[in-house]
Amino acid sequence: ATVGSDLSIVDGVVAMEGDGPIMGDPKSANVIVMGRNAPAVDATCTRLMGLNPYGVSYLTEASGKLGPIHEHNITQKGEPIPLPSAPFKVIDLPHLAMVQAN
């Protein structure tokens, strides 16, 4: 929040699901996401994973303070966000509230 970022880049050509980054399983996503606002980039990646960004605690905390996470407040350029063939598997951790997107 103090320094901020000029550009966030996520290499999602091969992503990871489950207990990553070491114990997870690779999953082909074939995407590269970039943007000038880190919460918007992370929220977009969360949607690409078939998850709801409002179920990710750090994104809900960042929303409105560090940047937008609501889909209508993020300007999408390039290709439209594809729906995943199947939502990413996530591990169940009590301190991480991850919910499937609708």
Image (tube, rainbow, N blue to C red):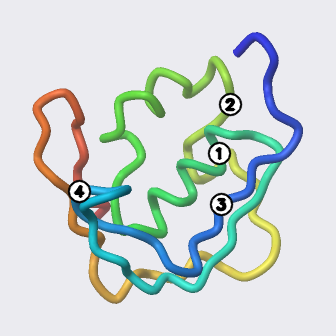
SS label for mark 1: helix
- The amino acid type found where label 3 is placed reads Val
Give the Cα separation between the discs numbered 1 and 2: 6 Å
Name the mark on residue 67: 2
- The amino acid type found where label 2 is placed reads Gly
Mark 1 Cα shell of 10 Å, populated few (<14), some (14-19), many (≥20): many
Q: Position of residue 71 (x, y in %)?
A: 58, 53
Q: Nearer the viewer, mark 3 or mark 2?
A: 3
- The amino acid type found where label 1 is placed reads Ala
Give the Cα separation between the discs numbered 4 and 2: 27 Å
Mark 2 Cα shell of 10 Å, populated few (<14), some (14-19), many (≥20): some
Q: Quadrant of the C terminus?
A: bottom left
- Residue topped by disc 3: 10
SS label for mark 4: loop
Left or right position of 82 against 100: right
Name the mark on residue 19: 4
Residue lying at 53% horizontally and 60% vertically, measured from the top left: 45
